[in-house]
Image: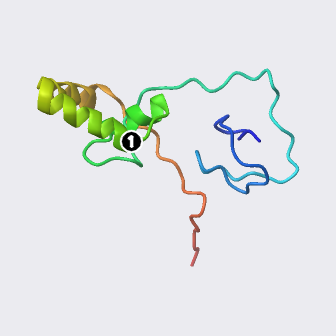
Amino acid sequence: MICPNCQKEIADHSNFCYNCGARLIAGAPAPPAYAAPAAKRLTRSTANKKIAGVCGGLAEYFDLDPTLVRIVWLLLVLFAGTGVLAYLILWIALPPAPARIAANSVTVTP
């Protein structure tokens, strides 16, 4: 099954997309096969960040594990020495990703 929101493959009979958190309606029609996937933008992650979200944003853009990106970045800092400067440039240049509303968040009205 394909999520109609993020166009990623998910398990059949899922209630929520585990990639984007969108609620899936049972029996809803599948998106058309000819629909182009949403354009990817390189942004800083607001959900998966340790310092500024640069590694999390790179991991989301390239569909990688954020821990792997952080380890590669640490190796660039230790051995090449250019990792710190590149991180600072990306921290300034990349816009933050739009905040996502959690699928399981509940609003309580008094």
Name the residue at 72% across, 48% down.
11
**Left or right side of 105 for 90:** left
- Identify which amino acid the numbered label 1 is placed on: Pro
Nearer to the camera, 73 or 54: 73
**Left or right side of 110 for 17:** right
Which corner quadrant of the image does residue 109 belong to?
bottom right
Name the residue at 33% across, 28% down.
94
Nearer to the camera, 104 or 15: 15
Dot 1 falls on a residue whose secondary structure is helix
Mark 1 surroundings: few (<14), some (14-19) or many (≥20) residues within 10 A = many
> Looking at the rendering, in which quadrant would you find the N terminus?
top right
Nearer to the camera, 74 or 3: 74
Instruction: Indicate the position of residue 21 as horizontal and vertical percent values.
Output: 60, 51
Nearer to the camera, 70 or 94: 70
Mark 1 = which residue?
Answer: 66
**Left or right side of 43 for 71:** left
Instruction: Indicate the position of residue 93 as horizontal and vertical percent values.
Output: 29, 25
Name the residue at 36% across, 39% down.
68
